[in-house]
Amino acid sequence: GAVVSQHPSWVICKSGTSVKIECRSLDFQATTMFWYRQFPKQSLMLMATSNEGSKATYEQGVEKDKFLINHASLTLSTLTVTSAHPEDSSFYICSAKTSGRYTGELFFGEGSRLTVL
Amino acid sequence: AQSVTQPDIHITVSEGASLELRCNYSYGATPYLFWYVQSPGQGLQLLLKYFSGDTLVQGIKGFEAEFKRSQSSFNLRKPSVHWSDAAEYFCAVGARAAGNKLTFGGGTRVLVKP
């Protein structure tokens, strides 16, 4: 089946630094990737939709300059949390849609846990 | 806009007993419906999905779900739970018209008693 890999799986950083999280589709091409954020014991909230070769579309309330998304290739999307603060600590999960005929299914990465000190 | 409601935040069930998790959705057209399971600190695993056709859908790990259009529901069931079924379960709705985005319910945490 389709595999999506996220890296790093967990990261700890100091307040004010930037952190980059990668999302890779390992065995398929993904024209569209989605980034979700999950707070402890809560559901997943869509942050943005990332389309290869174009600007990401952000959900209402998500700061574009805070969460930079780049989808430079059909197998890689990155989320950069800029000038991270403790309130950015969360579990970030990406998902990818195959570039072929729409099957409706999205494939999820393992998630990346960010802790900002 | 699409939305999903999972009325039960927590459910405790004895091992070997049956399990039913409720999911209600709101969407103007026929949605794509999904159930995912998440173990602590892990990503999501797809249990099953409904796109069209037979309204009773079989999934992995012995789970099944039934789409009831009249009730806007997509409840998940398992006849006999195992201790390994303890996890968080998310119902999600998506649609091509919505850009394939998935909207998730709040989740139901399942605890399994020995």
Image: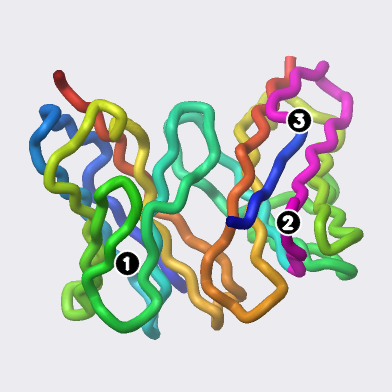
Query: Are the residues flagged by discs 3 and 2 in contact, CB closer than 8 Å?
Result: no
Q: Position of residue B22 (x, y in %)?
A: 21, 54
Quarter of the image that includes the C terminus of chain A: top right
Same-chain check, marks 3 and 1: no
Q: Is residue A59 left or right of residue B110?
A: right
Cα gap from disc 2 to disc 1, whole angstroms: 32 Å
Which numbered dot is residue A8? Answer: 3
Q: Position of residue B16 (x, y in %)?
A: 11, 33
Specify the subunit that label 2 lies on. A
- Residue A27 sits in quarter: bottom right
Span of residues in magenta: A8-31
Same-chain check, marks 2 and 1: no
Q: Residue at x 57, y 66 (%)?
A: B101
- Residue A61 visible: no
The residue that label 1 is drawn on is B25
- Which amino acid does the dot numbered 3 rest on? Pro
Cα gap from disc 3 to disc 1, whole angstroms: 34 Å
Q: Residue at x 63, y 56 (%)?
A: A2
Specify the subunit that label 1 lies on. B
